[in-house]
Amino acid sequence: MFQVNCQPVKLLSLGVNAGYRSSKNDPKPTKNIYGYVTYSKIPGINMAATLSATLLETSYMSGQIFGLGISRDLVPGKLWGGLDYRHVSYKFTSGETKLVQNMAEVNLTWRILRKLSCGVYFEGTIDNQSLFNRVYLNITQRF
């Protein structure tokens, strides 16, 4: 695995994460690469925006995930909110089966105390046959 993150100029962050795994039991090694660009303060709306891409290849599938997310403080220092969209495309090698999904997420994180926060995430996934919904609750205590 290899990872590098940098901030070439104020408010702009870039990152790349690449991985390679090979096992005797796998007919083909697993490879993936993830990259992102974040601009942390869009003028006028005071939001952060992140554009990301993931490419992956395993012994049974290959795929791409492209995403765009925006987030901001709703109540400074106390409540953080975000919206994310991801387009997922997988192709399975056991046939010509292809899975395409569009995913949207809404999230809110409440900073209860300095090192304690609670987040709720709603995610909706649409593919060519159905609609899935998930709700996640996350409590984080930092030490």
Image (spheres, helix red, strand yellow):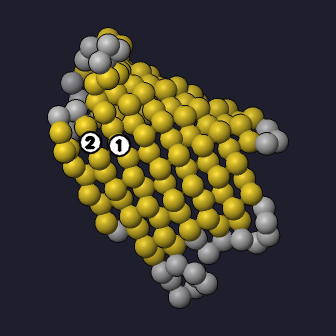
The dot on residue 37 is 1
Quadrant of residue 91 in the image?
Answer: bottom right
Query: In the image, residue 81 lies at what x, y percent?
Result: 41, 21
From what the image shows, is residue 12 above or below residue 15? above
Question: How much space separates mark 1 and mark 2, taking CA atoms?
Answer: 6 Å
Quadrant of residue 115 in the image?
Answer: top left
Query: In the image, residue 87 lies at what x, y percent?
Result: 60, 43
> Which of disc 2 and disc 1 is earlier in sequence?
2
Label 1 element class: strand
- The answer to whether residue 25 is visible is yes
Label 2 element class: strand
Which residue is rendered at x = 43% and y = 61% of the image? Answer: 33
Which residue is rendered at x = 32% and y = 23% of the image? Answer: 42
Which residue is rendered at x = 26% and y = 57% of the image? Answer: 4
Query: In the image, residue 50 lies at what x, y percent?
Result: 39, 36
From what the image shows, is residue 5 above or below residue 22? above
Type of amino acid under label 2: Ser
The dot on residue 13 is 2
Type of amino acid under label 1: Val
Q: Circles 1 and 2: CB distance less than 8 Å? A: yes
Residue count near mark 1 (Cα–Cα under 10 Å), binned few <14, some 14–19, many ≥20 = some
- The extreme right residue here reads 129
Which residue is rendered at x = 79% and y = 66% of the image? Answer: 96
Quarter holding the N terminus is bottom left
Quadrant of residue 19 in the image?
Answer: bottom left
